[in-house]
Amino acid sequence: MAYPVSPIAGRRSNWRSFAASLNLQDGPASSDSTPSPSEQTSDAGEVYGDSSENLISQKLKSDELKSLLADSERSKLLKKLSEANQYSRFLKRQLQMKDNDVVKFKSELAVMELELQALVALAEEIANFDVPSGSRKINGKYIQSHLLTRLEAVHDKVMEQIKDVDSLKHQEISVYWVGIAENVQIMGSFDGWSQGEAMSMEYSGYQARFSATLNLRPGRYEIKFLVDGEWRLSPEYPIDGEGSMQNNILVVN
């Protein structure tokens, strides 16, 4: 005896068969929300690699910025040094022109002094002669005596001016540094602490002696020695100042 099959029960049986066939063909389904260990490792490596590249890039940018700033400061310093050297050369040219004027003035004074010396001799000779009767007097003295006195006073003033001009003349002054070194340079107020003068080495006994010749006018100068890149004082010259402001003193008479 056959019993009728319910339509709902048949549909459920067909759905179970279709689902089973899908599971057999495709295999067990994996969850999309949970990545595999290999995928997790790969993703972590990519994140770490990106982070390292960012750090290296930032460091390179920082180094490049520091380099640019250093180059900028170096360029500014070189520009200032160039301007200072140009101004120093200008001052040296001006000083040379003034020195030439001083030499010319001294030669003119020397000629004037010789003329005055001759006039003084003549006036002295005239004053020693018998004074003619009726000669004029000034303040109780004959004019011959007044002439001699005035000429002698003018002659003395000219001689003082010649001495003053001589005091403006440059003198060759030798300076020394004694000690063991490779490179010695003398710096000082004689050129505004700008360039200084390189010193040549010579041997004196068992020690090396460095020497240089400076063209200086009479006066008081502060000096210091740059020995292998370090500031040094010499016991050969007086020392003035305190701490890092100490300098040797060079006096030109």
Image (cartoon, grey):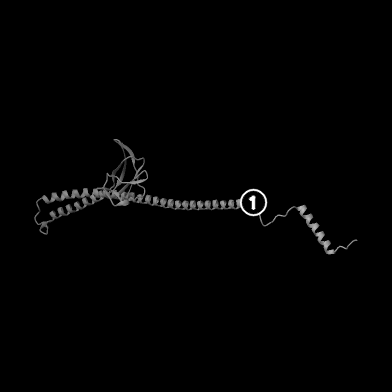
The quadrant holding residue 206 is top left
Q: Position of residue 245 (x, y in %)?
A: 31, 52
- Front position in the image: 245 or 192: 245
- Looking at the rendered image, the quarter that the N terminus falls into is bottom right
- Front position in the image: 247 or 143: 247
- Front position in the image: 140 or 32: 32
Residue 100 seen in render: no
Q: Secondary structure at mark 1?
A: helix
Q: Position of residue 198 (x, y in %)?
A: 35, 43
Q: Residue furthest right?
A: 1
What residue do we see at 76% from left, 54% from top? Answer: 23
**Mark 1 is on which residue type?**
Pro
Residue 113 seen in render: yes
- Front position in the image: 235 or 111: 235
Label 1 Cα neighbours within 10 Å, binned few <14 / some 14-19 / many ≥20? few
Q: Which residue is labeled 1 in the image? A: 37
The quadrant holding residue 11 is bottom right
